[in-house]
């Protein structure tokens, strides 16, 4: 296979599996998205979101493209459109859906070793990590903030 054909095949395969996983995740029920609770729990290293400040996440997270509204019936997370509790709950669920989709898009990169040499497969795996980790970080950071907002709102209602 020529180098140009290999590059085209890799690009086609990347787009196909990433869109396929994103579409499948967009069709999951809320209950299915919520199932891997361990995935979404705040990790000790996150320190209520302070961990992400080391990476200056506030400066770049809004520049990441949001494909949440790409598929029919999807949910755009570009900006907070309401501070209603029900809307915030949906937004939090959608950050979980987005995080899940990005985590699921990393492992298939290992399949690229089937038709690429070690260097090519390694490049694709590095791409998968470096591309998806910022999106995962943004979902987690936003969810931590939204959960704090929701708790403050609930606390104010009980007063």
Image (cartoon, grey):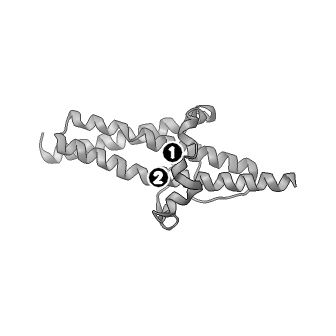
Q: Residue furthest bottom?
A: 59
Quick check: 104 left or right of 1?
Answer: right
Residue 104 position in % (x across, y down): 43, 38
Q: Residue at x 59, y 55 (%)?
A: 48
Using the image, determine if residue 108 lies above or below residue 58.
Answer: above
In what quadrant of the picture does the C terminus appear? bottom right
| Residue 50, quarter of picture | bottom right
Q: Residues within 10 Å of mark 2 (few under 14, many from 20)?
A: many
Residue 86 position in % (x across, y down): 74, 47
Residue 17 visible at all: yes
Residue 1 position in % (x across, y down): 12, 39
Q: Which secondary structure, mark 1? A: helix
Task: Say which of 27 and 155 sits in front.
Answer: 155
Quick check: 52 left or right of 94?
Answer: left
Q: Residues within 10 Å of mark 1 (few under 14, many from 20)?
A: many
Q: Which secondary structure, mark 2? A: helix
Q: Which residue is mark 1?
A: 99
C-alpha distance separating marks 1 and 2 = 7 Å
Q: Which residue is mark 2?
A: 135
Quick check: 102 left or right of 89?
Answer: left
Task: Say which of 24 and 36 sits in front.
Answer: 36
Task: Say which of 53 and 149 sits in front.
Answer: 53
Q: Are marks 1 and 2 in contact (CB under 8 Å)?
A: yes
Q: Residue at x 51, y 48 (%)?
A: 70
Mark earlier in primary sequence (1, 2): 1
> Residue 44 shows which numbered tag?
none
Q: Residue at x 56, y 54 (%)?
A: 47
Residue 83 position in % (x across, y down): 73, 57
Q: Residue furthest right?
A: 159
Task: Say which of 7 and 89 sits in front.
Answer: 89
């Amino acid at each position: 296979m020529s180098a140009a054909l290999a590059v085209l095949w890799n690009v086609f395969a990347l787009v196909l599996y990433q869109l396929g996983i994103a579409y499948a995740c967009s069709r999951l029920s809320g209950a299915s998205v919520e199932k891997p609770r361990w995935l979404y729990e705040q990790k000790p290293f996150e320190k209520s979101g302070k961990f992400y400040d080391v990476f200056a996440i506030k400066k770049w997270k809004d520049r990441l493209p949001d494909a949440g509204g790409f598929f029919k019936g999807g949910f755009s997370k570009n900006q907070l459109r309401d501070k209603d509790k029900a809307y915030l709950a949906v937004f939090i669920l959608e950050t979980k859906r987005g995080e899940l989709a990005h985590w699921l898009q990393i492992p298939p990169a290992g399949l690229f070793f089937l038709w690429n040499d070690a260097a090519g497969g390694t490049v694709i795996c590095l791409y998968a990590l470096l591309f998806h980790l910022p999106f995962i970080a943004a979902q987690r950071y936003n969810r931590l903030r939204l959960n704090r907002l929701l708790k403050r709102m609930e606390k104010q209602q009980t007063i």
